[in-house]
């Protein structure tokens, strides 16, 4: 609902999503599934017939993989179709034939046929499952025809196993089936299928007899056909709802709990069907307890499989932390507004005097409004989660340490009790409290709760032996002490249990604090990174600190020439990935999916490669050397959060870079526009004057007097000089902007440079009083050609903005090891607000110019660039009592006589 409201407020966002979705659909290939309820009903035959029809229509068709059949009529249809080369994979002294995904992607036909959608690929193939091969083909824009039976759908696996008694191992996620553009049901009567079986048209005679006795019974086939027809009807209904926009998320929220139990997959599938039926949200919750760190490797593997299954079936996976699983589930259900929870049937443990409430009963008591559905356990034996066995030496050392702590606490308590009893006369009731302290110390500082109970028993025996009559025996004369002992024991056990619980809570809180600290530190470091390289380095450091494994971070597309950011846990590890691991990283970048260790794509890889990505873009690839060890759910959650933070930081940095590039491009466009505008205006005036004067001379040469002709010649000359200076400034500015200006610096006499510059000053300067004041034999290091241009520009600027007969003074004198050169005038001067802008390109003051011709605003810009290139700085000052001074300094060259 919130998403639709956002689109109502921003229709452009809604339109953009529609256009992107349509573009993605056009680029992606289309999938057609030939669907049946059993082998032998003609799925491959129907697929081949459709392929021939497509080929006759002019479509480029390739048979990628057709399962070898003993049915001649089916194999005959492969004639006339281009057959893709089969990939041979060696496995345990066998050569297996598999679909050649690499060859298909290289061939890239319009339509490819790939039989057996649910097939499991041999070890060594790119993907673990064939449906993943087909997904990659679709992503490459290739249309695919394939086949599958109803028993291979993940959500129906348990139902069909209950009917047939056979658990199908090769399964596909329901989303692959539901998202197919077309599903064609291939159907025949069960009697006809059995007849085909008897005739040997499906299997050989011996195989057919075994099949009809086990799987291909008439009752099984009827049930499978009914399930297939119902599943097709569900798919049609789902498609109609989506087309009519009738599917909307209701208030139903289905929750399941993830665990390493073998029956947990059954619960996940059942909950998935319920979520689809109610059109509700589907969440899978895993509660990590303190004992999770001791989980054996087999349980970790099974938990990861169940987590992936939940994700495949559309569940949102959430991790919580606590010591009481029931309380954590109830708390999450209340916060997330869960309406239904699906659980596996639990076994009630019978105790000595009472029966402990089952898991569902405890949950029902904590969350009475929650609907609880129990799924029968299909396994003959109940699952018991066992702790991973510690190494014998570690376990032995821990036992002796705990025993020492327990003995030391009892010894100290006994010593204190003797002192209090003998010297201070404390009563037995007070002595009991001393031993209570020893029990609490044992519970706090030992690793297991049993030591608190042992301390409780031992404290009673020691108290009875030393502090009750008869002394130094275990006999009790006063019956009242028996009650004291019982109360003491119960109190000690309860205190020990509560202490253990507090320790568990402290451990969980420490873990939560650690998670929060890492995420906050990651967020802070990434915000302060300032560049893509720093973001990569800090992300790799955080992952290395969390996982204690080698981390390789590739910015952009991984390649042999690209150098990753590496954080090593093993100093002997290489600085780059080898070719096989690099290929996994490249696949991850291209397909925007995780691959490598513990995934279904390149599962034999050593590294786990993960895409650092936003919704539609991959910014980087992180490769983590797993060293054949799985990641716990706690670490995986933090790792995902770190990668999300990194993706956000990379996206933000790229946006900043793009914005800077856009601003620079805009500035260049503005510079180009200003330059063209200025040139078009400033060139037009002198060129018009030159052409007009030339036309006057040509048309009226005999009628003009010598003085008039000289005046016209003077104007033509002045305009030509002005154009020459303009072009010189433009060329110099261009060389400075593109960095091609090279300085030829050598020692020059400053007075000679000024004299040469005065020879090129605009003739209008003859109307001014120009005076030179220069120290004798003052030499400075400079590029003489550029420095002459600087002085010309400064003098022309003074001439342009001062009235006739104004005084312009060029001074040059030595100040220390610097030569100070200044050009001053006594004109109207420059207001303070305009002084910071004088050296900006294309900026001109508002002062009136003597001849009415405004400059382009390049002269002073060029002066500043040249002086800066000489290692100096040009400044502007007020001339007292009026006027302006431009002053710069150069390095002095000592004169050797």
Image (cartoon, helix red, strand yellow):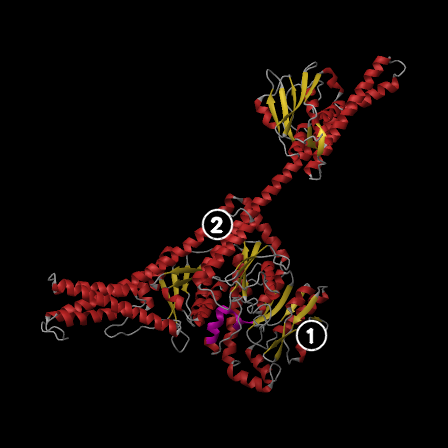
- Disc 2: which residue: 525
Q: Nearer the viewer, mark 1 or mark 2?
A: 2
User: Which mark is on residue 555?
Assistant: none
- In magenta segment, residue 675: no
**Residue 117, visible in the rendered structure:** yes
Q: Quadrant of residue 293?
A: bottom left
Q: Main secondary structure of the magenta part?
A: helix
Q: Which span of residues is magenta-colored?
A: 149-161
Residue 134 in picture, x, y percent from top left: 60, 66
Assess disc 2: are there few (<14), some (14-19) or many (≥20) residues with their C-alpha within 10 Å of its C-alpha: some
* Residue 844 rendering spot, x and y as whole percentages: 65, 25
Look at mark 1 in the image and give the residue it sits on.
77
Picture quarter with the C terminus: top right
Indicate the quadrant where residue 740 lies: top right
Instruction: Say which label, 1 or 2, has the lower sequence index.
Output: 1
Residues at marks 1 and 2, CA–CA distance in whole angstroms: 63 Å
């Amino acid at each position: 609902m919130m998403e639709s409201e956002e689109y109502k407020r921003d229709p452009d966002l809604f339109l953009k999503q529609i256009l992107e979705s349509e573009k993605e659909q056009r680029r992606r290939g289309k999938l057609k599934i030939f669907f049946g309820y059993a082998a032998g009903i003609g799925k491959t035959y129907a697929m081949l017939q459709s392929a021939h029809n497509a080929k006759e229509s002019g479509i480029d068709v390739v048979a990628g993989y057709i399962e070898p059949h003993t049915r001649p009529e089916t194999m005959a249809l492969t004639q006339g179709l281009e057959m893709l080369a089969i990939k041979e994979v060696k496995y345990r002294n066998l050569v297996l034939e598999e679909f050649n995904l690499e060859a298909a992607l290289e061939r890239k036909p319009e339509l490819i046929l790939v039989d057996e959608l649910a097939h499991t690929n041999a070890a060594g193939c790119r993907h673990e499952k064939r449906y993943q091969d087909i997904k990659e083909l679709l992503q490459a824009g290739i249309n695919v025809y394939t086949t599958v039976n109803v028993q291979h759908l993940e959500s129906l696996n348990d139902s069909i196993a209950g009917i047939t008694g056979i658990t199908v191992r090769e399964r596909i996620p329901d989303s692959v089936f539901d998202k197919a553009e077309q599903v064609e049901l291939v159907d025949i009567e069960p009697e006809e299928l059995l007849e085909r079986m008897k005739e040997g048209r499906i299997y050989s005679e011996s195989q057919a007899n075994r099949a009809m006795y086990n799987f291909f019974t008439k009752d099984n086939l009827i049930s499978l056909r009914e399930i297939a027809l119902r599943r097709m009807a569900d798919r049609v209904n789902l498609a109609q709802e989506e087309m009519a926009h009738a599917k909307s998320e209701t208030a139903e929220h289905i929750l399941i709990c993830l665990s390493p139990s073998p029956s947990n997959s059954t619960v996940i599938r059942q909950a998935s069907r319920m979520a689809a039926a109610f059109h509700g949200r589907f969440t899978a919750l895993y509660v990590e307890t303190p004992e999770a760190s001791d989980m054996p490797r087999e349980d970790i593997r099974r938990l990861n499989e169940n987590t992936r299954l939940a994700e495949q079936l559309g569940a949102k996976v959430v991790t919580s932390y606590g010591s009481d699983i029931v309380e954590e589930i109830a708390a999450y259900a209340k916060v997330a507004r869960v309406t239904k929870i699906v659980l596996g049937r639990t076994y009630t443990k019978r105790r000595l005097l009472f029966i402990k409430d089952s898991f569902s009963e405890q949950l029902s008591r904590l969350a009475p409004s929650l609907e609880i559905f129990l799924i029968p356990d299909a396994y003959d034996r109940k699952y018991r989660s066992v702790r991973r066995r510690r190494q014998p030496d570690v376990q032995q050392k821990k036992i002796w340490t705990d025993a020492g702590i327990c003995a030391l606490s009892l010894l100290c308590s006994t010593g204190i009790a003797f002192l209090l009893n003998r010297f201070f006369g404390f009563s037995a009731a007070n002595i009991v409290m001393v031993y209570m302290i020893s029990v609490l110390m044992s519970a706090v500082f030992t690793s297991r709760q049993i030591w608190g109970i042992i301390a409780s028993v031992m404290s009673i025996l020691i108290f009875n032996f030393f502090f009750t009559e008869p002394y130094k025996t275990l006999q009790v004369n006063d019956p009242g002490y028996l009650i004291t002992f019982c109360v003491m024991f119960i109190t000690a056990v309860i205190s020990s249990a509560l202490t253990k619980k507090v320790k568990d809570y402290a451990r969980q809180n420490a873990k939560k604090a650690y998670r929060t600290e890492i995420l906050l530190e990651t967020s802070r470091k990434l915000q302060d990174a300032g560049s893509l390289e720093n973001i990569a380095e800090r992300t790799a450091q955080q992952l290395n600190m969390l996982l204690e494994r080698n981390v390789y971070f590739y910015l952009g597309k991984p390649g042999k020439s690209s150098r990753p950011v590496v954080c090593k846990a093993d100093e002997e590890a290489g600085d780059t990935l080898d070719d096989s691991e690099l290929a996994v990283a490249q696949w991850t970048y291209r397909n925007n999916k995780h691959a490598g260790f513990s995934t279904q794509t390149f599962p034999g890889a050593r590294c786990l490669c993960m895409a650092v990505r936003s919704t539609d873009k991959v910014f980087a690839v992180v490769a983590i050397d797993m060293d054949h060890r799985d990641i716990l759910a706690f670490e995986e959650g933090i790792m995902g959060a770190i990668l999300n933070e990194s993706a956000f930081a990379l996206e933000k940095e790229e946006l900043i870079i793009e914005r800077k590039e856009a601003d620079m491009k805009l500035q260049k466009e503005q510079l180009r526009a200003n330059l063209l505008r200025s040139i078009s205006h400033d060139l037009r005036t002198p060129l018009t004057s030159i052409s007009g004067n030339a036309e006057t001379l040509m048309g009226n040469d005999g009628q003009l007097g010598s003085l008039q002709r000289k005046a016209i010649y003077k104007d033509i000359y002045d305009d030509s000089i002005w154009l020459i200076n303009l072009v010189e400034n433009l060329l110099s500015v261009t060389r400075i902007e593109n960095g091609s200006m090279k300085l030829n610096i050598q020692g020059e006499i400053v007075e000679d440079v000024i004299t040469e510059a005065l020879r090129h000053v605009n003739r209008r300067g003859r109307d001014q009083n120009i005076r030179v004041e220069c120290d004798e034999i003052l030499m400075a290091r400079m590029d003489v050609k550029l420095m002459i241009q600087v002085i010309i520009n400064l003098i022309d600027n003074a001439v342009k903005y001062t009235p006739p007969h104004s005084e312009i003074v060029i001074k040059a004198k030595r100040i220390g090891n610097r030569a100070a050169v200044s050009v001053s005038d006594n004109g109207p001067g420059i207001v303070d607000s305009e002084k910071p802008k004088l050296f900006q390109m294309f900026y001109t003051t508002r002062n009136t110019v003597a001849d009415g011709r405004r400059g382009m605003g390049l002269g002073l810009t060029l002066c500043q660039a040249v002086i800066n290139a000489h290692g100096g700085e040009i400044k502007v000052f007020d001339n007292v009592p009026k006027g302006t001074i431009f002053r710069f300094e150069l390095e002095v060259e000592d004169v050797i006589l």
